[in-house]
Image (cartoon, helix red, strand yellow):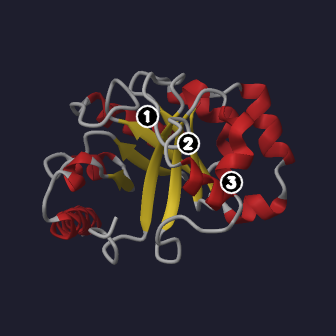
Amino acid sequence: MERILGAVTNVQIDIVDGHFSPSRTWLFNHKDEDKISAIFEQEMGMPYWQELNYELDLMVKEPIQYMDMFISLGPAKITFHLEGLETETTLAYFEQMPEIIRSAIAFGIAIGIDTDPAGIAPYIQYIESIQCMAIKNVGYQGQPFDEGVYEQIQKVKKLYPDKSIAVDGGVSLENAAQLVQAGATELVIGSALFQNTDSRGTIEAFQQLCENVITQSES
């Protein structure tokens, strides 16, 4: 984490429950339970919580049942995966959500590479962003980039022009420009960042590349 302090303001944490995807991560793999309990009891905060905004990417089946746990981590944003949601339960949660939560946390919906983005429609009034996954098997690092995401981005942009569009999975300096050109407004960088010894330099390269694309599109 120290490698990116001062270079970014937002950090996305992938949380996988072992049901939505076979792997299990923090919160579901029974590791660091003492630290997790301390965070839940507000005896300590997330690492560098004063300097970073945490976003939770919930690769979790029916995540509404765990919402108290997720909210207790103090995230700035929570992203649900459409394929893991039970529609009636999720809509009821949004409709009954206390204003204090609604005002403190942004919500998003993620969709798989082969998922019809029309399925987001029931939730659209409650979310601020849509995350397009650019890999086939969600929940695993280091997977190959799927170029089908370019078309997916364009579909999302046409259906929901007022929403931010994020891309997660296989994002690299080689495809970042084309992703922004297709309509992406946020890029989630994982392997391309942490497998590079110069994390800050990599972040700066991504930022400059994206700024160049935006400048060119406006000129």
Q: Secondary structure at mark 2?
A: loop
Q: Secondary structure at mark 1?
A: helix
Sequence-wise, which precedes: disc 2 or disc 1? 2
Q: Is residue 128 visible?
A: no
Position of the N terminus, as image quadrant, is bottom left
The CA distance from mark 2 to mark 3 is 13 Å
Q: Is residue 120 above or below residue 6?
A: above
Position of the C terminus, as image quadrant, is bottom left
| Amino acid type at mark 3 | Ile
Quarter of image, res 137: top left
Mark 2 or 3, which is nearer the eye?
2
Sequence-wise, which precedes: disc 3 or disc 1? 3
Quarter of image, res 45: bottom right
Left or right: 60, with 23 as reference point: right
Residue on which the image places disc 3 = 71
Residue at image location 65% in from the left, 49% down from the top: 70
Q: Single out the residue that lies furthest toward the front.
A: 34
Q: Are marks 2 and 1 in contact (CB under 8 Å)?
A: no
Residue on which the image places disc 2 = 27
**Label drawn at residue 85:** none
| Amino acid type at mark 1 | Lys
Quarter of image, res 89: top right
| Amino acid type at mark 2 | Leu
Locate residue 214, reporting x and y percent. 28, 64
Residue at image location 25% in from the left, 62% down from the top: 210
Residue at image location 36% in from the left, 50% down from the top: 184
Sequence-wise, which precedes: disc 2 or disc 3? 2
Q: Residues within 10 Å of mark 3 (few under 14, many from 20)?
A: some
**Label drawn at residue 155:** 1
